[in-house]
Amino acid sequence: MTVAADGATLGLALLVGVSLGLLGGGGAILTVPILTTVAGVEPRAAIASSLLVVGVTSAVSFVQHARAGRVRWRIGGLFGAAGAVGAVLGGLVGARLPSTLLMLLLAATMVAAAIAMLRRRASAGGTARPRPRTALVLLQGAAVGVLAGLVGAGGGFLIVPALAVLAGLPMAAAVGTSLMVIAMQTLVGLVAQPALADVPWQLVLPFTALAVVGSAIGTALTGRIPDRVLRRAFAALVLLVAAGITWQQLQLLVLLPLP
């Protein structure tokens, strides 16, 4: 595949990185649509590319958050280990599903993520709560991991609310721990992606580099922008992109010849 990087695609890579560093999620649900609709990458290759971009960017941002003391290692380790196993399973299942179905599933995931961000109370991370049960953390991690491998979505917008509401983590700690989980499950899920050989490296390498720069900016902004403003603005963006994906895939379905 010979897909070259352009200014619009690389500019949006910064947005992906800022989202990951600042919110602990949103990387994949932006990366896959950007690669498919803006750069013209085939959906399966875009999903594999997304796992690579998000995995590397999350790992770098995670290190920055860890140095600032915003990572809860036990919860993140349990969630991430279960998510890594789920990501492999999701990748194997996704290889057997039509590309259009994967994209529509991604759009549905984006809508669910946006709703979760809008409904999460700003006070969710304000007070500490008792440790969540290990079995519950493992179950949630596995479920999000399957989603990651299936549609190339790291699940940060599902992980962060879970960590803040169910685990009682402060918002900043939920973001840092989410990045730990995303890095673990996306990099492992990448191994199970059959489209890895089709990754357009001439696009993905500069895209990843700029996403890493954006993640550093987002990490530096953590805690400086009101959570309520971020949640509403980003939820609106996610819903807009989901609508665009759905419209594009429905048009493709209409144009497909009947068997």
Image (cartoon, rainbow, N blue to C red):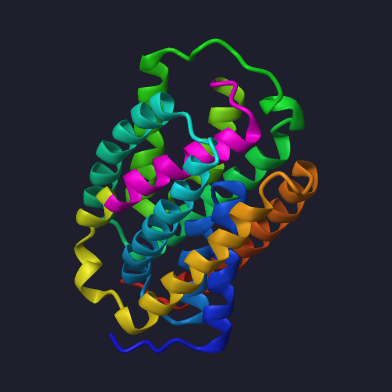
Residue 129 drawn above or below residue 50: above
**Nearest to the observer: residue 158 or residue 184:** 184
**Nearest to the observer: residue 246 or residue 128:** 128
Rendered residue at 29%/40% (across/down)? 84
Q: Position of residue 39 (x, y in %)?
A: 47, 82
Q: Quadrant of the C terminus?
A: bottom left
Rendered residue at 19%/72% (across/down)? 197
Q: Position of residue 140 (x, y in %)?
A: 42, 28
The segment highlighted magenta reads 167-187
| Residue 182 left/right relative to 225 | left
Q: Quadrant of the N terminus?
A: bottom left
* Residue 257 visible from this viewpoint: no
Q: Looking at the magenta stretch, what is its main secondary structure?
A: helix
Rendered residue at 31%/70% (across/down)? 45
Residue 14 drawn above or below residue 60: below
Magenta span includes 188: no
Q: Position of residue 15 (x, y in %)?
A: 60, 67
**Nearest to the observer: residue 41 or residue 219:** 219
| Residue 204 left/right relative to 66 | left
Q: Position of residue 173 (x, y in %)?
A: 57, 34
Query: In the rendered image, which quarter is residue 73 located in?
Result: top left
Rendered residue at 49%/13% (across/down)? 131
* Residue 155 visible from this viewpoint: yes
Query: In the rendered image, which quarter is residue 83 located in?
Result: top left
Residue 157 drawn above or below residue 131: below
